C-alpha cells in the first residue's frame, strides 16, 4: 500500500521508526518530512499528508506529533479526510471499521513506539465494515459544505 507519513519535532523520532517499519513490511512510503527534529509547525506537515491522501497520491496517511491532536484537527480540515487520533489498537480497529479513517494520527510523546507500530498495523490491515456505517460516513462529508463558502474549494 502507498502510505504518506509525516510528523513535527514531537513525533520525529517515532516517524523515523514508523517509516522503517512500513518499508520493512513492503509498503511504499511517501515520507513528507521533516528531515530532522528541528522545531516545525505541525499544521504544515498535517496538510502535506492530508492533501496526498485526498488527491490519491497515497491511499492512507500516518501523522505523528506530541499528542496526535493537532495533526488530527488540521488534517480533518481537508475535504475527503477522516483523520483519527488513536492511542490504542482497539481504537485503530474501530476507526477503520466504523469511521473508514484514511489518516491515523499518533502521539510521539505519550504512546510508546511498539504500541504505535501495532496501531499502524491495525490501521492498515482493518477493512471498513460498510453497512450502516456508510450512511454515517457520508454524513461526515456532507458537513464539509459548511467549511467554506460555496464554490471556494481549493483546486488540486
Ligand atoms: C509541539 O510542541 C506540540 O504542540 C505538538 O507536537 C502536538 O502535540 C500538537 O498537537
Image: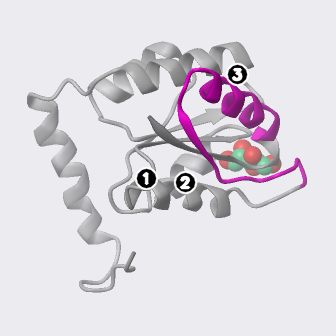
Q: How far, Cα to Cα, is label 1 from label 3?
A: 24 Å
Q: Quadrant of residue 17?
A: top right
Q: Is residue 83 left or right of residue 132?
A: right
Q: Which mark is residue 49?
A: 2
Which element is circle 3 on? loop
Q: Is residue 138 above or below residue 43?
A: above
Percent position (x, y) of residue 130? 15, 29
Q: Which mark is residue 135?
A: none
Q: Quadrant of residue 11?
A: top right
What residue does disc 1 label?
53
Determine if the magenta segment contains residue 63: no
Residue drawn at x 65%, y 57% as measured from the top left:
45
Residue drawn at x 14%, y 37% as measured from the top left:
134
Residue drawn at x 25%, y 60% as measured from the top left:
143
The quadrant in which the N terminus is found is top left
Q: Is residue 39 above or below residue 18?
A: below
Q: Nearer the viewer, mark 1 or mark 3?
A: 1
Q: How far, Cα to Cα, is label 1 from label 2?
A: 6 Å
50 vs 10, nearest the viewer: 50
Q: Residues within 10 Å of mark 3 (few under 14, many from 20)?
A: some
Q: Residues within 10 Å of mark 1 (few under 14, many from 20)?
A: many
Residue drawn at x 37%, y 80% as measured from the top left:
155
What residue does disc 3 label?
111
Give the magenta range. 11-38
Amino acid at each position: 500500500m502507498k502510505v504518506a507519513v509525516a510528523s513535527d519535532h514531537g513525533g520525529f523520532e517515532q516517524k523515523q521508526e514508523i517509516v522503517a517499519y512500513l518499508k520493512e513490511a513492503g509498503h511504499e512510503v511517501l515520507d513528507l518530512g521533516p528531515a530532522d527534529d528541528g522545531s516545525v509547525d505541525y499544521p504544515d506537515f498535517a496538510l502535506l499528508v492530508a492533501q496526498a491522501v485526498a488527491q490519491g497520491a497515497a491511499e492512507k496517511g500516518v501523522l505523528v506529533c506530541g499528542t496526535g491532536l493537532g495533526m488530527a484537527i488540521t488534517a480533518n480540515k481537508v475535504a475527503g479526510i477522516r483523520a483519527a487520533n488513536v492511542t490504542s489498537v482497539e481504537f485503530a480497529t474501530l476507526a477503520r471499521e466504523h469511521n473508514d479513517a484514511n489518516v491515523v494520527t499518533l502521539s510521539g510523546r505519550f504512546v510508546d513506539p511498539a504500541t504505535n507500530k501495532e496501531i499502524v498495523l491495525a490501521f492498515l490491515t482493518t477493512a471498513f465494515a460498510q453497512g450502516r456505517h456508510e450512511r454515517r460516513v457520508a454524513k461526515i462529508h456532507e458537513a464539509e459544505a459548511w467549511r467554506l463558502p460555496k464554490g471556494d474549494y481549493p483546486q488540486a
